[in-house]
Image: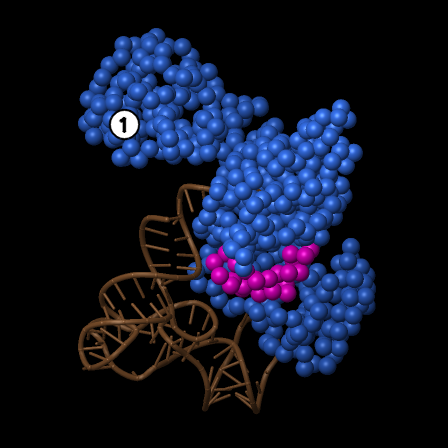
RNA sequence: CGGAGUGUAGCUCAGGUGGGAGAGCACGUGCCUUGGGAGCACGGGGUCGCAGGUUCAAGUCCUGCCACUCCGACCA
């Protein structure tokens, strides 16, 4: 491709209001442009990268036995009403009406659509298994789109859905998808983790996330270097060391004027934070309350709490709600509580701890479960953090943040039951199909790759997804030898199948160097002042190594670039 | 959805207390120049986010709305 004829609108300055490297560089280097919040245009370079990522995904999905389809973006509300998601999905679902006033939605995901297709066309176990995927634009009216392609309202996703006759078979399919995902993210050159994840509202038996390690990512994970345990903190388990037994001391009420937070109490009473218990009052699905006890040095994991309660939503009670329950804010207590009390396992062998006294300005010290109050049980409500013992090997866990680029779920029968997607098994009985679903954020991957592959001058594309493999810069196109040599190298490279961009623009050398650094093509040949000695210069974007290349050795060199 | 900020030329931005719409870069023409965003000259380019209000007079003051960005909540 000739740069003089390719639309690459690079920017000299960082766009205002744009913060993170991938967003800045994708715009500055002319890969994307913003149309509206969370809605982007893919320019020629951006589209080339997108297509290369898509092809890698297709190769491995096809290789794992999945088949590609393309489902409608526009989906009738009736399907969504069957599974209840017309109501549950809320404001995130883009809704519209046709001329007959019938409700439709722009697809944010396609469980309903694919399940409908399968139930209409599958009768027998002989028709199964099936595994479909598509690469398509999705729509979600996010409350807060951000960071360019990382969280958009319109984005490109690879979504896949599998249908098996038994859970045993479904797990095999799931494992095959897991393998395919490993191949995809490895081939994309990403530094990523596969972590155990919470299934969330989508339901199902279990799920794994594929998370690209980036600083300030929105996914928080813990992992173990020793045994390779890794999990999203929402789902992460951790080992608890047993505490030694203690002699029970007499319960005592103490005056703690204006002292509310764990930190303040710990200082005021000179007691470590891990002997202070937080009593957190939660509102459950807007129709009940529960008090949850957890050690003062730990964070409660609301996902674990919601899962335990089988609740859709839990949130801390507001000041008004506490008042209506007669609970003094900051002094909530399990002693004298008239709402159900659950305790985190951190209280299981803890003795003589501090709790609120259910009375302003007072706490109890030397409190003990069973003697001073009763609970419904001990459960795992703690949030794993750096340094907690690994649940498998008990060595300290590490914490990192990342960007979720893939998520796979073993769904089970959630959608097949809701939509009557059944098959007749060998025994002649009708059974619901066992489903799995598998997502990859394709457009988000572009940003993820740039987040992991850039420097202060621009993007450094991995070979597999670079928009071009070789960039030829003719520094002065008015020098006839230079431009002629440029085109000769360009023709040879093209003949070898090397995707090449020739910078034949009549602009200053400085602008060409700035642009090529920004765009980030892996290999570069510069045709400049050494041409009269029969040499051109090679530069690698990644290592920024340079050397002079004899024109006579060019063929060998191009072969090595082609690899 | 809560909180904060921004909105003036294609881009980045400046425009105390109300009175001429500006700079740098970009763009066009010409000259000059060609190894890290060159130089000179001339030139084109504006609904100052939108609507209303105050005023003799509003980019500037007031009210409402919209858009975008950031923090948080949310996120199959």
Q: Position of residue A167 (x, y in %)?
A: 68, 28
Say if the magenta span includes residue A30. Answer: yes
Which chain is drawn using blue?
A
Q: Position of residue A236 (x, y in %)?
A: 52, 30
Q: In percent of the image, x 52 and y 35: which residue is there?
A: A200
Say if the magenta span includes residue A96. Answer: no
Give SS at disc 1. Answer: loop
Range shown magenta? A27-52
Depth check, front residue: A23 or A546: A23
Q: Quadrant of residue A377?
A: top left
Q: Position of residue A304 (x, y in %)?
A: 47, 29
| Mark 1 crowd level (few <14, some 14–19, many ≥20, 10 Å Cα) | some
Q: Quadrant of residue A174?
A: top right
Give the colour in which the image draws chain B.
Answer: brown
Q: Position of residue A47 (x, y in %)?
A: 64, 61
Left or right of A246 on screen, residue A268: left
Q: In percent of the image, x 53 and y 51: which residue is there?
A: A103
Q: Which residue is outermost to the top?
A: A247
Q: Chain of mark 1?
A: A
Q: In percent of the image, x 48 and y 63: which residue is there?
A: A14
Residue A481, compared with residue A213, is above or below; it is below
Q: Specify whether residue A360 is in view.
A: yes
Residue A477, compared with residue A114, is above or below; it is below
Depth check, front residue: A46 or A470: A46
Left or right of B6 on screen, residue A555: right
Q: Which residue is outermost to the front?
A: A100
Q: Quadrant of the C terminus of chain A?
A: bottom right
Q: Specify whether residue A213 is in view.
A: no
Residue highlighted by disc 1: A325
Q: Quadrant of residue A494?
A: bottom right
Residue A4, compared with residue A252, is above or below; it is below
């Amino acid at each position: 491709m000739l740069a003089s004829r390719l639309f690459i609108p690079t920017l000299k300055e960082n766009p205002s209001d744009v913060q993170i490297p991938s967003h800045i560089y994708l715009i500055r280097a002319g890969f994307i442009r913003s149309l509206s919040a969370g809605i982007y245009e893919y320019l020629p370079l951006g589209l080339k990268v997108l297509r290369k990522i898509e092809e890698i995904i297709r190769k491995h999905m096809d290789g794992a036995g999945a088949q590609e389809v393309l489902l409608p973006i526009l989906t009738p509300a009736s399907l969504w009403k069957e599974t209840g998601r017309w109501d549950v999905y809320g404001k995130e679902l883009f809704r519209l009406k046709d001329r007959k006033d019938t409700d439709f939605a722009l697809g944010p995901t396609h469980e309903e659509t694919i399940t409908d297709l399968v139930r209409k066309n599958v009768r027998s176990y002989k028709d199964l298994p099936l595994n479909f995927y598509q690469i398509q634009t999705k729509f979600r009216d996010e409350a807060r789109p951000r960071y360019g392609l990382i969280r958009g309202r319109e984005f490109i996703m690879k979504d896949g859905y599998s249908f098996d006759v038994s859970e045993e078979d479904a797990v095999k399919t799931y494992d095959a998808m897991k393998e395919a995902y490993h191949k995809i993210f490895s081939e994309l050159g990403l530094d990523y983790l596969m972590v155990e994840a919470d299934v969330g509202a989508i339901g199902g038996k279990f799920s794994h996330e594929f998370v690209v390690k980036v600083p300030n990512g929105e996914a928080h994970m813990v992992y173990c270097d020793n045994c390779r345990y890794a999990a999203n903190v929402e789902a992460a388990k951790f080992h608890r060391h047993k505490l030694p037994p203690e002699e029970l001391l007499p319960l005592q009420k103490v005056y703690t004027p204006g002292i509310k937070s764990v930190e303040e109490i710990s200082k005021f009473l000179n007691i470590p934070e891990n002997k202070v218990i937080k009593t957190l009052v939660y509102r459950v699905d807007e129709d009940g309350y529960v008090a949850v006890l957890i050690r003062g040095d730990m964070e409660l994991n609301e996902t674990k709490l919601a899962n335990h309660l089988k609740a859709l939503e839990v949130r801390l009670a507001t000041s008004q709600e506490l008042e209506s329950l007669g609970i003094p804010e900051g002094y909530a207590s399990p002693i004298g509580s008239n709402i159900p009390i659950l305790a985190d396992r951190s209280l299981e062998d803890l003795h003589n701890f501090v709790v609120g006294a259910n009375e302003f300005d007072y706490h109890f010290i030397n409190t003990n479960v069973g003697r001073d109050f009763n609970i419904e049980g001990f459960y795992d409500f703690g949030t794993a953090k750096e340094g907690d013992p690994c649940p498998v090997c008990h060595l300290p866990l590490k914490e990192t943040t990342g960007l979720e680029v893939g998520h796979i779920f073993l769904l089970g029968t959630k959608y097949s039951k809701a939509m009557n997607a059944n098959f007749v098994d060998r025994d002649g009985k009708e059974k619901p199909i066992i489903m799995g679903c598998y997502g990859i954020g394709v457009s988000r991957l572009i940003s993820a790759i740039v987040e992991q592959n850039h420097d202060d001058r621009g993007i450094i594309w991995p070979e597999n997804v670079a928009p071009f493999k070789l960039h030829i810069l003719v520094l002065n196109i008015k020098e006839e030898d230079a431009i002629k040599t440029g085109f000769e190298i360009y023709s040879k490279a093209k003949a070898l199948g090397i995707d090449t961009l020739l910078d034949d623009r009549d602009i200053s050398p400085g602008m060409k160097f700035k642009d090529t650094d920004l765009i980030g093509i892996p290999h570069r040949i510069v045709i400049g002042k050494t041409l009269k000695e029969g040499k051109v210069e090679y530069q690698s974007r990644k290592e920024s190594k340079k050397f002079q290349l004899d024109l006579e050795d060019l063929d060998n060199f191009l072969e090595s670039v082609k690899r």
